[in-house]
Image (cartoon, rainbow, N blue to C red):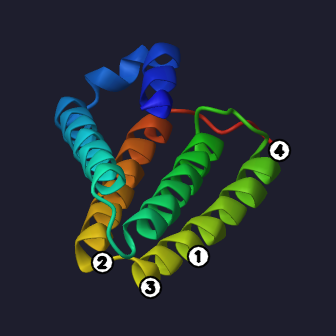
Amino acid sequence: MVLILVSSLRYPAIFRLPGAGLVLTLTVVMLLGYAACGLWALRHPAAGHQTGLAWGALAGAMWSAEIWCGGPAKLPHSAEQALGASFVVLAVVATVTDVLAAAAAHLVINLALGLLGGGLGALTTRRLPHPAT
């Protein structure tokens, strides 16, 4: 949510891109759903819920960092590539670990959030010029 807020404030023109409203709406709904699942898991602990929640939150943070490095951070191209690739690897590792540690329903949530996060990242970086190297 922080990434969406900061990107929206820094780049208000992203809302004029085709499909931006739909992507934003779906992203917010998915994040709220994920938060509701997390709260439910914390209030009704069962085997694997807390572990799955921790790995899912870590994976979400890594995907958010990768999106941030790829656009809103306005890093030099080489730093963008190096940090972005590092966070992709960490995000994939965290997501795979989450898959192995959590229930199948948790997997579906993470995959959907990853896809929506990737779509949001594509929207925020589509119109931004890369600095010359």
The N terminus lies in which quarter of the figure? top left
Task: Name the mark on residue 103.
Answer: 2
Q: Is residue 46 left or right of residue 79?
A: left
What separation in Å lies between label 1 and label 4 (alpha carbons)? 30 Å
Counting other residues with Cα less than 10 Å from the Cα at mark 1, is it few (<14), some (14-19), or many (20 or more)? some
What is the x, y in percent for residue 66?
59, 52
Mark 1 secondary-structure assignment: helix
Q: Residue at x 50, y 39 (%)?
A: 125
Mark 4 secondary-structure assignment: loop
**Of callouts 1 and 2, which one flags the residue occurring earlier in the amino acid sequence?**
1
**Of callouts 4 and 2, which one flags the residue occurring earlier in the amino acid sequence?**
2
Residue named by callout 1: 93
Residue named by callout 4: 133
Q: Nearer the viewer, mark 3 or mark 4?
A: 3
Task: Name the mark on residue 100.
Answer: 3
Mark 3 secondary-structure assignment: helix
What separation in Å lies between label 2 and label 3 (alpha carbons)? 8 Å
What separation in Å lies between label 3 and label 1 (alpha carbons)? 11 Å
Q: Amino acid at mark 3?
A: Leu
Task: Name the mark on residue 65.
Answer: none
Q: Are marks 1 and 4 in contact (CB under 8 Å)?
A: no
